[in-house]
Amino acid sequence: MAPLIALLLTAAVARLAGLAGITALDGWHPSLRVGLAAMFVLTGLAHFGLGRRQDLIAMVPPRLPRPDLLVTVTGVLEFAGAVGLLVPATARWTGAGLAALMLVMFPANVSAARRGLTLGGRPVTPLGSRALLQVLFIAAAVAVAVDP
């Protein structure tokens, strides 16, 4: 739920800043890019700490090699994506890349739900709810990628 809150709250604050006269944030598209960037910074941090790294490693489907390396690589990609979203010249390609990344990472959520894992002592988000969130996150990234 924290990524959703980061996305929505940061995008709303960015939009308000645009309405208050910050030209770079004037419009839904730049505000969405800032919201997504904040979300990916938050999720990227979880790959390296915040007490979540071991949980994320456990989520990787058992058939995949080196779950620790996969979590590190995806964390680095999330940080790079956050930066790329903030650069107007790269935002569209970054949005497309992040949408693809989220699609590729979704099987880890499926695997965790099917195996009944707990994260931080709590059960993983039920698969139906997690799938809806993922659709929302991917739709936001696609919206950035297809900016008119």
Image (tube, rainbow, N blue to C red):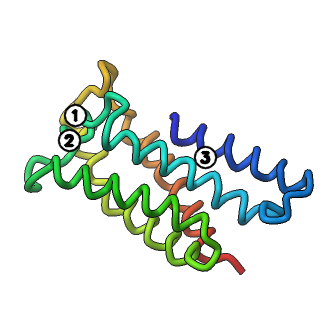
> Pointers 3 and 2 in contact (CB under 8 A)?
no
Where residue 108 sits: x, y (%)? 26, 49
The residue under label 3 is which amino acid type? Answer: Leu
Q: Amino acid at mark 2?
A: Ile
Label 1 amino acid? Gln
State left or right for residue 25 relative to residue 55: right
Q: Nearer the viewer, residue 17 or 2?
A: 17
Residue 32 image position (x, y, % from top left):
67, 58
Q: Image check: 76 left or right of 19?
A: left
Q: CA distance from mark 3 to mark 2?
A: 24 Å
Which residue does the image show at 83% across and 63% down from the upper left? Answer: 26
The image quadrant that residue 37 belongs to is bottom right
Position of residue 94 relative to residue 69, above or below, is below
Against 101, residue 54 (above or below) is above
- Label 3: how many Cα within 10 Å (few below 14, some 14–19, many 20+): many
* Category of crowding for the residue at label 1, using alpha-carbon neighbours closer than 10 angstroms: few (below 14), some (14–19), many (at least 20): some
Nearer the N terminus, badge 3 or badge 2? Answer: 3
Give the residue number, with chain letter if any, for mark 1: 54
Image quarter where the C terminus lies is bottom right
**Discs 2, 1 touching: Cβ within 8 Å:** yes
Q: Is the residue marked by circle 2 packed among few (<14), some (14-19), or many (20+) residues within 10 Å?
A: some
Residue 64, quarter of the rendered image: bottom left
Q: Quadrant of residue 142?
A: bottom right
Classify 119 as above or below 21. above
Q: Which residue bears the numbered disc 2?
A: 57
Taking the spot 43% from the left edge, 43% from the top edge, the residue there is 130
Q: Picture coordinates of residue 27 (x, y %)? A: 81, 64
Q: CA distance from mark 1 to mark 3?
A: 24 Å
Residue that label 3 marks: 7
First in sequence: mark 1 vs mark 3: 3
Q: Residue at x 43, y 71 (%)?
A: 97
